[in-house]
Amino acid sequence: MREVRSLPYEITREEHVWIPVSDGTRLAAKIWRPVSADDEPVPGILEYIPYRKRDLTAVRDSVHHPYLASHGYACVRVDLRGTGESEGVLADEYLEQEQQDAEDVLAWIADQPWCDGRTGMMGISWGGFAALQVAARKPASLRAIVISSFTDDRYSDDFHYMGGCMLSDNLGEAGTMFAYSTLPPDPALVGERWRDMWLERAEGVGPWVDTWLEHQHRDEYWCHASVCENYSDVQVPVLASSGWADGYSNAVTRLLANLSVPRKGLIGPWSHKYPHLGQPGPAIGYLQEVVKWWDHWLKDRDNGAMDGPMLLTWMQDSVPPSTSYEERPGRWVGEPQWPSPHIDWRTYPLAQHRIARPDEDVPQSALHVESPLSVGQFAGKWASYNAPPDLPYDQREEDGGSLVFDGDELTETCEVLGAPKLRLELSVDKPVAMVAARLSDVHPDGRATRITYGLLNLTHRDSNHDPRPLEPGKRYQVELELNGVAQAFPPGHRIRLSLSTSYWPLAWPAPEPARLTVHTPGSSLTLPVRPIRESDEVTGPVFGEPEGSPPMTTTVLQPGEQRWTVSRDLVDYRSALEIVKDSGTVRLDDIDLEISRRAYERYSSVADDFASVRGETKWSMTFARGDWEARTETHTVLSCTPEEFVLHATLDGYEGANRVFSRNWHRRFPRDLV
């Protein structure tokens, strides 16, 4: 990334500002703005997240916000209540209180003498969620939003549930927020109150996964703050982006299809990263695009921000399977609108272990699969962070426990853009069962690179609101939409569809093994084929070089560690996936603060005992300066029986060597067709 030091506006930074909200709670903010804004007010930009502006996002913030402020904006970075130095307790995600606080913050920004009354919101992940959700509430000052790696559907397209199947990230991300929501504020900013604030958080917070397990179906809990419930609530322009390696790739095209406001979409090859920090590459000059967006919608500049395609996306070329990539070869392609008039939906019948030609008569056959729990060990993360390497590996071993359908060898390049659809006529021998569908690019030497996948809890075949058990032996027609993708399959390769009845540990398995029977010719695969037309291609340099402000200085005191290990013991048949994300110890030089972070996840099972699956997360986080040291340790374990989920969690806080609080949770939740 190019570090830019000479920009149009000289800026000033306010390290710690209290923003009062309507119930008297004070939220902590850091503000960057032009010096000239004292006399010439500018628009305000809010980033609103729980990830600690003072320390844990400080380096990233130092790249983004000074850059935007130097282009004539007041950038306000606010921690949610109960996080960082903000007062209160953060008890769950996307609550009504959180969104009301955001409206209060926007009103405060618009009322400041350095703001001209117009505001925008931006963010990635939680920040993208927050901006979209708040936009749907129509605050008076909000004029536009810029969002990355987000969803509009909290139940069906977030890390909790997918196709009615519970994701292991439901536990993994709960472990993350269990740690983050119980951290202390910095005494350098809040003084001696820091300890009382820390204890208040420890007493008021629990493992959020217990709430998420109380809502195993799509109910009002999930409908709240899901913008897909009423897209017309969003009345401001939207610049939306994500990456094909991210878990949040689908919402961009849904917004393009369903919003009626001015909107642009951008999908690159990236994991869960901002596009200018994109991994796998190529990263792009995203902050320049953001400035252009704000200049158009907040400063009324006719700068061509809405010119060009509605959707720009990276058409990925074929690559061998790998758990990480530095770069994904490909090219930018553009679509004038979405759904695109260029997409040719082609339906291929499923035959006996083959993807048949569209016009082929397929004989009747019944194909069976009952997958071992080992299918899924090379699935990677639901949302890749690219550290440690967490993309799906070679699918051949996964295919050994799956029902496989291979297409003909391609004689010319086939490009797909969109979400493949699967129609299955099936029967199952159990009342609760799942199907995982994977689409792979099979190379001439046999290696198989997964390009997309989808999950369906078959009890959710008709509804996520009101699932129904299956009648063993009865035939059903079900439809399953896979994640969207842009992928080129070259000549000599094959397209492969693989079906399995387990996908652990990416998704929690059904209560017991199930035998799935797929009936032909009532089953088919539909691909969104994008014919290659030269007139539709994007030519020339699409984006500039990634750039930002120079990052704040840090010193690595102890290096970190990254591990992703799959193990199998052939004596007692125990299998496990272990993930280590250790950031080591880093000092933020400007504030002389030392930070240590270590996260550990383990997902295990024994043989094909579906009741043996177990997930575990451990976090340890330490903050130290001089003779002050505070540490939190969290531990969450989720196991199951065929009838219940069993949760055990602990929270411990240490001031120096002394433990100052300790809490335990133990709960059981009936499995409700999950």
Image (cartoon, rainbow, N blue to C red):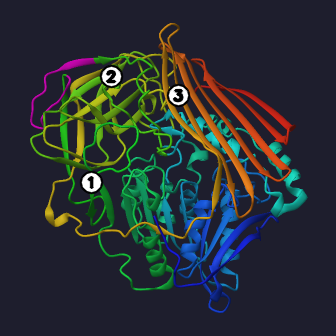
Q: Amino acid at mark 1?
A: Gly
Q: Nearer the viewer, residue 298 or 326?
A: 326
Q: Which residues are magenta?
A: 353-367
Q: Which residue is mark 1?
A: 330
The structure residue drawn at horizontal position 60% and vertical position 66%, both measured from the top left corner, is 62
- Kindly tell me whether residue 628 is visible in this rendering: yes
Assess whether mark 2 and mark 1 are in contact (beta carbons under 8 angstroms). Answer: no
The answer for how far apart the CA atoms under marks 1 and 2 are is 30 Å
Q: Is tag 3's residue or tag 2's residue first in the polypeptide sequence?
A: 2
Q: Amino acid at mark 2?
A: Ser
The spot of residue 405 in percent (x, y) is 23, 27
**Dot 2 lies on which element?**
loop
The structure residue drawn at horizontal position 38% and vertical position 63%, both measured from the top left corner, is 265
Number of the label disc, if any, that sits on residue 402? 2
Number of the label disc, if any, that sits on residue 674? 3
The spot of residue 330 in percent (x, y) is 27, 54
Q: Quadrant of the N terminus?
A: bottom left
Q: Nearer the viewer, residue 461 or 525?
A: 525
Label 2 environment density (alpha carbons within 10 Å; few <14, some 14–19, many ≥20)? many
The answer for how far apart the CA atoms under marks 3 and 2 are is 21 Å
